C-alpha cells in the first residue's frame, strides 16, 4: 500500500468515529468542544498510533481505533487553548472557538476534550497494565506540551534563542505528542520494551521534523497553498530553526520584520539559500528522522514498518 | 478522634506532600502552577478520599497519600481556570494566577495541574484494575466539572433558573469532585461495588450540601469571617438555592442588586427568615446529606465510618 492511501484510509476511519462520538453534540459546551475537532485535520497523530500498533502486532488497529481518538482529542485541546493565548480568530478555515464563542467557553471546551482523551485511553481494548501505562504516558505528555507552549511564548520576547533551546521547545511542543502517539500504539498492541522505545524515539523525531518542515513551508510555500501568509514567521520575528541558523551565520532577518512584501520574501529566500540555511535546515530534519528510522530495525519486517519509514520521509518532504 | 483533629492531620499530610512535589518549582510555568496550590486551602477532597479508603480498609491511606493529591490538583486546576473566566484577581488572600502572571500562563498552569492529577492517580499504589478505574472516574469527573462551570456561567444571564437546574449545576460543578474523591478512595482501597456506590453518593451529597452552605455563609456570615463580601451573591444577582426559593415564594430580591449596604443585607436576611427560606435551604441540605449518610451502613462499623458521618454533618453546619 502507498503511504498516501494508508493515511487517507486511517483519516477516514478516525473521521467516522469522531463523527459518531462528537457529531451530535448536546448543549452549547459540547458544540464548542466538537467544533474544531470536526473542522478537518490530517489526523496524523492517530494514524501514527495505529501504524505503530500494527507494526508491532499485525491487524490490531481496529480494536485500538477509539483509543487513537485520544491523540487527536489531545492535539485539538491544545490547539483550542493555544488559539486563546495567541488571540487567533481563524484556523482550518473556520472561526476559532474563542472567536465563534468566547474565551471562557474555549477554555472549557479544551478542558472537556482533555478529559475525554483520558476517558478514551482508559477505556481502550487492551490489557489493564497497557492501558494504565498509556494513560501515564499521555499525562506526562500533556505536561510537556504545556511546557513547550510556555517556552514558545517566552521566545517571542527574545532574540537570542539558541538552536538547542529551540529544539528543546519543539521536542516538547510538537515532538512529545507524536512520540506518545507511536509509543502508546506500541504499548496497547503489546509491544516489548525495545519496540516501545524505538517507536517513542521515532515519533519524537517525526514531530521535530514536522515542525522544521512547517517553518520551511511557512517561508517557501506558494501563497494560498498552506492557508497561512507566506513568511509570517519572519514578519513576526519568531524564533525558528531558519531564523536561528541565519542569525548564527551573521544574517540579520530582523530588518524584515513587520511588513514583508512578496519581493522582500523572495529576497529573504535568496539570502537564506545563498548562505546554505535552507539546505542546512533540511539536512537537520533529515538527519533527525534518519537516525530514528535506523532503529526501527527492531520491528518485524512488515509492510507497516515500511509505511512507518515512508511516514518519516513524508514529514521531511511534505510541501503543505 | 474528633473530626477537626482528623481533618487537621490529613491537611498537614497533604500539605507536606504538596510541598515535597511542588515546593521547589523549576521554571516560571511550574511556579505559576504551584502558586495557588501552595497558597492554602482546607484539602477537604483529599481528606474525604483518604477517609473513604480507610473506611473501606483500615490503615490503607498512607499508601494512597500521593493519589489523594490528584483530587486537590484537579480542584486547583478548575479554580485557576475559573479565575480566568471570572476575571478574579484575588483568592485565598493571594493574587490569582491570571493576576500575578497573565491569562496564557494561567491557562497553561491549570492544564499542567490537570495532567499531573492523572499522573499521580495512574501511579497510585494499588492494583492496576483499581487505578485504571480511578483514572476513568477522574476523567469523567473533569468532564462534569466543565459542564457544571458552563451551566453556572449561562445562569448569570437568566432570572428563571429552576431549583432542579440549580441542583444539577451544583451536582456537576461541586458535587462531582467530592463524589469522585470518596469513590476513588473506595476503589483504590479495594472496596466492593456497594461500598463504592454508597461512597460516591455520599460524596455527591456532601458536595451539594457544601455549596448550599456556601450560599448561606455568603449571606449570613459576619463581615470579614469568610474573606468574601457579605451578600455578594445577591448583589451580583446570582442564582443560588436561596434566591430561587425566595423567588418561588414571590420575594423579589432583584431590587437588592448592585449596591447592598449592611442595613439592606440585614433586611434581606429578615425577609428570607420571615418567609422560611433560610430554614428551607438548611432543611434541603440536611436531607440530602442525611439520605446519603443512611446508606453508609454497608460500610464496616469503624471509627472512620463515624468520622464520615461527622464530615457530612460538618458540611451542613460549618460557618466559614
Image (cartoon, coloured by chain):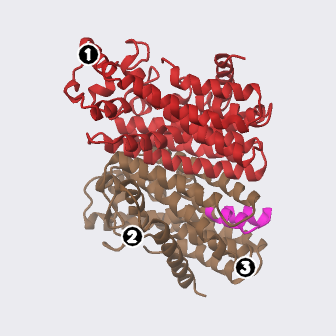
Chain colours: A brown, B red
Report the chain holding disc 1. Answer: B
Report the chain holding disc 3. Answer: A
Asked if the residue at tag 3 contacts the one at tag 2, i.e. Cβ–Cβ closer than 8 Å, the answer is no
Q: Main secondary structure of the magenta part?
A: helix
Disc 2, SS: helix
Question: Marks 2 and 3: same chain?
Answer: yes
* Distance (Cα) linking label 2 and label 3: 39 Å
Write down the region rendered in magenta. Answer: A181-200
Q: Is residue B250 left or right of residue B202?
A: left
Q: Residues within 10 Å of mark 3 (few under 14, many from 20)?
A: some
Of tags 1 and 2, the one toward the viewer is: 1
Q: Which residue is mark 3?
A: A58
**What residue is drawn where x is 25% and y is 56%?**
A259
Of tags 2 and 3, the one toward the viewer is: 3
**What residue is drawn where x is 43% and y is 17%?**
B226
> In the picture, residue B308 is in which quadrant?
top right
Q: Is residue B138 left or right of residue A57?
A: left
* Distance (Cα) linking label 1 and label 2: 71 Å
* Distance (Cα) linking label 1 and label 3: 74 Å
Residue situated in front as seen by the camera: B149 or B31:
B149
Q: Which residue is mark 1?
A: B267
**What residue is drawn where x is 24% and y is 16%?**
B264
Q: Is residue B34 above or below residue A104?
A: above
Question: Marks 1 and 2: same chain?
Answer: no
Of tags 1 and 3, the one toward the viewer is: 1
Q: Which residue is mark 2?
A: A220
Report the chain holding disc 2. Answer: A
Nearest to N terminus: mark 2 or mark 3: 3
Residue situated in front as seen by the camera: A61 or A310:
A61
Q: Is residue B210 above or below residue A44?
A: above
Amino acid at each position: 500500500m502507498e503511504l498516501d492511501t494508508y493515511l487517507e484510509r486511517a483519516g477516514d476511519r478516525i473521521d467516522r468515529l469522531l463523527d459518531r462520538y462528537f457529531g451530535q453534540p448536546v448543549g452549547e459546551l459540547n458544540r464548542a468542544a466538537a467544533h474544531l475537532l470536526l473542522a478537518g485535520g490530517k489526523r496524523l497523530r492517530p494514524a501514527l498510533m495505529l501504524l505503530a500498533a500494527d507494526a508491532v502486532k499485525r491487524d490490531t488497529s481496529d480494536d485500538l481505533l477509539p483509543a487513537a481518538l485520544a491523540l487527536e482529542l489531545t492535539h485539538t485541546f491544545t490547539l483550542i487553548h493555544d488559539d486563546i493565548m495567541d488571540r487567533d480568530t481563524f484556523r482550518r478555515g473556520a472561526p476559532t472557538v474563542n472567536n465563534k464563542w468566547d474565551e471562557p467557553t474555549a477554555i472549557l471546551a479544551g478542558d472537556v476534550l482533555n478529559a475525554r482523551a483520558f476517558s478514551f485511553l482508559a477505556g481502550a481494548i487492551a490489557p489493564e497494565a497497557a492501558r494504565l501505562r498509556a494513560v501515564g504516558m499521555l499525562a506526562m505528555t500533556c505536561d510537556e506540551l504545556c511546557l513547550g507552549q510556555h517556552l514558545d511564548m517566552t521566545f517571542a520576547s527574545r532574540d537570542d534563542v539558541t538552536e538547542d533551546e529551540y529544539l528543546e521547545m519543539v521536542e516538547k511542543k510538537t515532538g512529545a505528542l507524536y512520540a506518545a502517539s507511536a509509543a502508546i500504539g506500541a504499548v496497547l498492541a503489546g509491544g516489548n520494551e525495545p519496540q516501545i522505545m524505538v517507536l517513542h524515539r521515532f515519533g519524537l523525531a517525526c514531530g521535530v521534523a514536522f515542525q522544521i518542515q512547517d517553518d520551511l513551508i511557512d517561508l517557501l510555500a506558494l501563497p494560498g497553498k498552506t492557508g497561512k501568509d507566506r513568511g509570517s514567521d519572519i514578519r513576526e520575528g519568531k524564533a525558528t530553526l531558519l531564523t536561528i541558523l541565519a542569525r548564527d551565520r551573521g544574517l540579520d532577518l530582523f530588518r524584515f520584520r513587520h511588513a514583508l512584501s512578496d519581493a522582500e520574501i523572495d529576497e529573504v529566500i535568496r539570502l537564506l539559500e545563498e548562505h546554505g540555511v535552507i539546505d542546512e535546515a533540511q539536512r537537520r530534519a533529515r538527519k533527525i528522522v534518519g537516525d530514528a528510522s535506523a532503529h526501527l530495525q527492531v520491528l518485524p519486517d512488515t509492510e507497516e514498518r515500511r509505511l512507518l519509514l515512508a511516514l518519516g520521509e513524508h514529514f521531511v518532504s511534505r510541501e503543505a
